[in-house]
Amino acid sequence: MPCTPRHPLLALALSGLLAVAAAGCTPIGVAVGAGAAGATAAQKEKGFAASVDDTRIRAELNGLFLRTDADLYQRLSFTVEEGRVLLTGRVAKPEARVDATKLTWSVRDVREVINEIQVDDESGLTDKGRDLTIATRLRTRLLVDDQVSFINYSIDVVNQTVYIMGVARSETELQRVLGTARDIPYVRNVVDFVRVVPPA
């Protein structure tokens, strides 16, 4: 007898992740990944059109930074939600933060740049590993929480500070997400850039 998932959204997210992992980086894998991303985007609170536009902005940012400054590109991460771009990572000089902001604003349809780049290039592998562990634990907890719409959130962790962007369906959901983040071991700070959708 076939098993019926209790949480269809969870099943969709997990199947998308498994499809991308199994396909790898081959042309077929890229096509599968794009399809899975499209299915996820269609369910986001902000709608399919906005999600696709965010995907384009992120792609342009990656291309622009790679062409302009490959070293800076490797040091930074870009999170895009509704045209708002969150920049995180570590750089050696303060001037690099300014350069990153200028490049980001040059991309069409960017509505806001949130620069959380840290001028600190002395952290070791232990710190980076801990950041990855925090991000993985938080994403996993939110993914299995049936009171949270996980696909509406983006998470980044730098130096044990958790950055959360996205769209919350209610203030209650947002506080649940923030509380979950604060409960993860080794988290020093939680920075919230989430927008709460007004009640219909």
Image (spheres, rainbow, N blue to C red):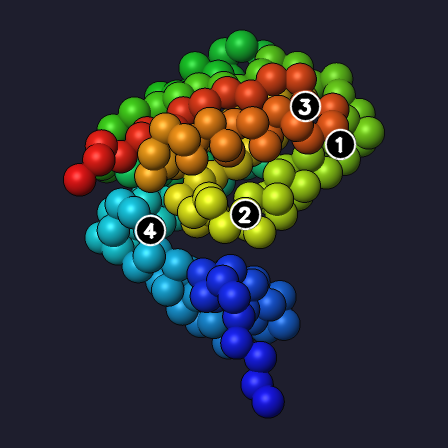
Q: Position of residue 19 (x, y in %)?
A: 56, 71
Q: Residue furthest top?
A: 94
Q: Earlier in the sequence, mark 3 or mark 2?
A: 2
Alpha carbon separation for disc pair 4 and 3? 27 Å
Foreground of the two, 118 or 141 = 141
What type is the residue that disc 4 sits on? Lys
Mark 2 Cα-neighbour bin, 10 Å: few <14, some 14–19, many ≥20: some
Give the tally of numbered discs: 4
Secondary structure under tag 2 reads loop
Q: Nearer the viewer, mark 4 or mark 2?
A: 2
Q: Position of residue 86 (x, y in %)?
A: 43, 28
Residue where numbered disc 4 is placed = 44
At x 29% / y 47%, what residue is drawn? 45
SS at mark 3 in the image: loop
Query: Which residue sits furthest bottom?
Result: 1
Residue topped by disc 1 = 130
Q: Amino acid at mark 3?
A: Val
CA distance for labels 1 and 4: 29 Å
Residue hosting label 2: 145
Closest to the observer, 42 or 23: 42
Q: CA distance from mark 1 to mark 3?
A: 9 Å
- Mark 4 vs 2, N-terminal side: 4
Q: Is residue 54 above or below residue 191?
A: below
Q: CA distance from mark 2 to mark 1?
A: 23 Å
Mark 3–mark 2 Cα distance, whole angstroms, equals 20 Å
In the figure, is residue 30 to the left or right of 35?
right
Asked if labels 2 and 4 touch by Cβ distance under 8 angstroms, the answer is no
Say which of marks 1 and 3 sits in front: 3
Q: Which residue is mark 3?
A: 187
